[in-house]
Amino acid sequence: MRGPGRHFNRSLTVWRETAVDDGAGGQEVTVTQVGTVRAKVDQPSPTERLIAQQGGSSHSHNVYLPARADVRRGDELRGTDAIGNAQRFRVLSVVQPSAPVYSKALVELTQSQQEG
């Protein structure tokens, strides 16, 4: 069975909120880069968009990842698109098909800007 793995054409950094001790008995939440993954970023189908809208979600893209990629709900994926625009995606959920040949992250584009 062939999945999108042969099409992972982008590298995205994975950022995650992490609680660290603040030295005074409490904790601070910081966003830390926890890794880099190969990925393929696609637009969701019209049906996926409709279902997301009905559920109150802002699902704007599908990100296909290797099956064992450490990407979780709440993570942020950062990278650039094919023409150099910086992009940030918030991970809404991560699912796998019945045969785990890849993972699919449903994400929301939170920032896109042209570098220049």
Image (cartoon, rainbow, N blue to C red):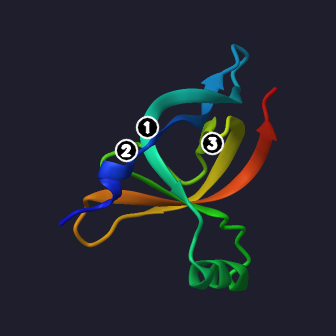
Amino acid at the residue labelled 1: Val
Q: Is residue 33 above or below residue 45?
A: above
Residues at marks 3 and 2, CA–CA distance in whole angstroms: 20 Å
User: Mark 2 near mark 1, Cβ–Cβ under 8 Å?
Assistant: yes
Look at mark 3 in the image and give the residue it sits on: 81
Q: Residue at x 68, y 35 (%)?
A: 84
Residue 26 in the image: x percent, y percent? 71, 26
Look at mark 2 in the image and give the residue it sits on: 69
Taking the image as shown, residue 75 lies to the left or right of residue 24, namely: left
Q: Quadrant location of the N terminus? A: bottom left
Q: Residues within 10 Å of mark 2 (few under 14, many from 20)?
A: some
Q: Residues within 10 Å of mark 1 (few under 14, many from 20)?
A: some
Residue 114 in the image: x percent, y percent? 79, 37
The first of marks 3 and 2 along the sequence is 2
Amino acid at the residue labelled 2: Ala
Residue 66 appears anywhere in the view:
no
Look at mark 1 in the image and give the residue it sits on: 37
Residue 21 in the image: x percent, y percent? 64, 21
